[in-house]
Image (tube, grey):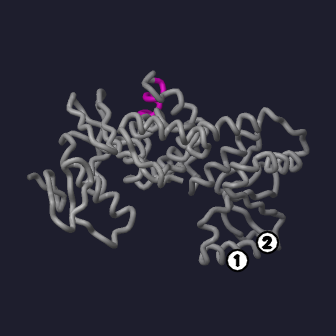
Amino acid sequence: MDNNGDAIRGQVRLVGFERLSHGLYQPTRPGLSADQAFLRDLRALMLILPTDAAFTHVTGARVLRWQLPNLPDNVPVFAAVRGDRRPRRHGLIASRLTLPSEVAVVDGLPIDSAEEILLRAARDLGVIDLVILLDSALRLGHVDPTRLGVLETSGRPGSVRLRRAHSLADGRAESAGETVLRIFHEVMDVPVEPQASIYDHDGHLIGVVDLLVTGMDRAHEYDGAGHRERRQHTVDLRRERGWSNSPYTRSGYTLDDLLNHPIVVMHELDRLLGRPHSLRRIQRWRTMIDESLYGERGRARVMNRWRRIVGVVEWSGTA
């Protein structure tokens, strides 16, 4: 039997071991966080992968700690390998590396280049999902613009979608929710400045807002789960009290607003700008949602694609 750390390749019939994949076991380790367990599983999978393999797609993105879109719970592990040896395992998608690619080691794991990670993700995900990955990768300084540009014009699968997502990306976003809110404003033809600093009448800094509508004293922010946590909520309230001595007005939007009530939000923006409503804008937004993991159709499309590749997966636990 082979081993890698505490993982074992072979047949194990001992109490206290869990089966990770066919012929791959590791001792149970209660108390690990989700991220710790994820990295441990990837290290174990190195036993069945070729030595030149690298984790890619959303697997690589997660190891690199990028912001992720609305992924289902049971996502396959994605790896890129050279040559013809591509392991076939339940829950593992191994694709072939045909062109030179830089591989980095992160947390002891081989990770594909940021540009290749994005291109491989573009084969499956929608534009909104990709922009979330791109925003985070740009913010962390992981993307080489020249290499990304080469991939966008390479004609490889996903290159057109990646190019479209790149045109909407902005490395100033701090969360996936902020990215979705900014894309909504882009689709609604409302120009905004991300992560804008605002000041009161005395010139004192009030804070930095997610989006500032260009040419107006209107701050639009994403209200997600992080803003409901006690400490963050206290910070938000303290900041908003400082707005009383300023010309700014704040509006908060949730993911539910953007996904389930976009017409209401569009009407608010149209009234703010004093313009008539346009069904074209809302239709474009709904199409983008339907193609992404935030829409039922897009989610089903991606899950069915992964299911066909990896075989039968227990999807009942997905949200």
Question: Is residue 196 shown to the viewer in this render?
Answer: no
Q: Report whether 288 appears left or right of 5.
A: right
Looking at the magenta stretch, what is its main secondary structure? helix
> Which residue sits at x=64%, y=41%?
289
Q: Report whether 243 appears left or right of 65.
A: right
Residue occupied by mark 1? 238
**Relative image position of residue 114 (x, y in whole percent):** 40, 42
The front one of 153 and 88 is: 88
Q: Report whether 130 appears left or right of 74.
A: right
The front one of 237 and 94 is: 94
Instruction: State the CA–CA distance, disc 1 to disc 2.
Output: 18 Å
Residue occupied by mark 2? 202
Number of numbered callouts drawn = 2
**Relative image position of residue 254 (x, y in whole percent):** 69, 58
147 is within the stretch colored magenta: yes
Vertical placement of residue 75 versus 227, above or below: above
Q: Residues within 10 Å of mark 2 (few under 14, many from 20)?
A: few
23 is within the stretch colored magenta: no
**Relative image position of residue 197 (x, y in whole percent):** 68, 61
> Which residue sits at x=23%, y=54%?
44
Q: Which labelled disc corresponds to residue 34?
A: none
Task: Give the residues drawn in magenta, as a range.
Answer: 146-153
Mark 1 or 2, which is nearer the eye? 1
Determine the image quadrant of residue 87: top left
Disc 1 or 2, which lies upstream in sequence?
Answer: 2
Q: Amino acid at mark 2?
A: Asp
**Relative image position of residue 296 (x, y in whole percent):** 60, 43
> Which residue sits at x=64%, y=56%?
195
